[in-house]
Image (cartoon, rainbow, N blue to C red):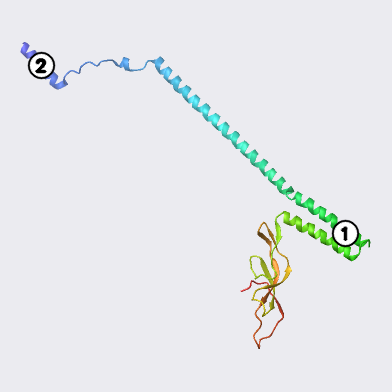
Amino acid sequence: MDQQNQKNKNNRERKEGPLAPEKAGTNEETTPKPEEKTAILVSELEELRKKAFLCDEYNERFLRLGADFDNTRKRLEREKQEFLKFANEAIILELLNILDDLERVVELAQGKHENLSSFLKGVEMILAHLYELLKKYGVKPIDAEGKLFDPHFHEAIMQVENKELPEHTIVEELQRGYLLNERVIRTAKVGVTKKPAAEGEPRQGRETSNQSLD
């Protein structure tokens, strides 16, 4: 009888497999309790609330910085426009002094209180004052007469035949040119030499030209 029971037991183990050993704990021990779940959710909610607050703070700070930048840009633009309006105030004041002198000289000449010699002397003094003013602000005349033609500084208006001077030598200054701090603001309009015409060719004393010299 005992042998039969043992045999049946062995058959059951082969079908069902060996009995699993008992685990160290139960499901109740590994599953969080309701109050623990609540505490975790509250902690996560608080963390999310902090992040949301930081996002709002950064967004508000960004908007403030954008508004400050826009206000600064507008202020600088206003200051720039104001500066440009009055940037030449100093030179204009000095030009007004020269204008006063010129008006006085003309007034005296019209009233016949000055002879021609005195009138010319007054005009020369005004011109000297004007040249000094231009020099003070970095303006100076371009050397022309007697120089070789340079298209960066000169504009040839006229060509004159001349066998004594090298070709393209400036022999006449028709309008003075000027530099402002070494930059050309007006080229000098000049007359230049050219080779005399060969025998048999028609001769021309002077020719006008608005094109660059070859």
Q: From the viewer's perspective, tell me whether residue 123 is left or right of residue 53.
A: right
- Whole-percent x and y of residue 55? 52, 30
Q: Earlier in the sequence, mark 2 or mark 1?
A: 2
Is disc 2 surrounded by few (<14), some (14 to 19) or many (20+) residues within 10 Å? few
- Label 2 amino acid? Asn
* Residue pointed to by mark 2: 8
* Viewer-proximal residue among 172 and 128: 128
Element at label 2: helix
Choose between 40 and 172: the one closer to the eye. 172
Residue plotted at (43% across, 17% down): 39
Looking at the image, the residue that sits furthest to the bottom is 200
Give the residue at the far top of this rendering: 1
Residue nearest the viewer, comparing 49 with 159:
159
Q: Residue at x 72, y 69 (%)?
A: 173
Classify residue 191 by image quadrant. Answer: bottom right
**Where does the C terminus fall, quadrant-wise?**
bottom right
Could you say where residue 110 lies in the image, as x and y percent from the top left? 92, 62
Query: In percent of the image, x 68 and y 45: which residue is there?
Result: 80
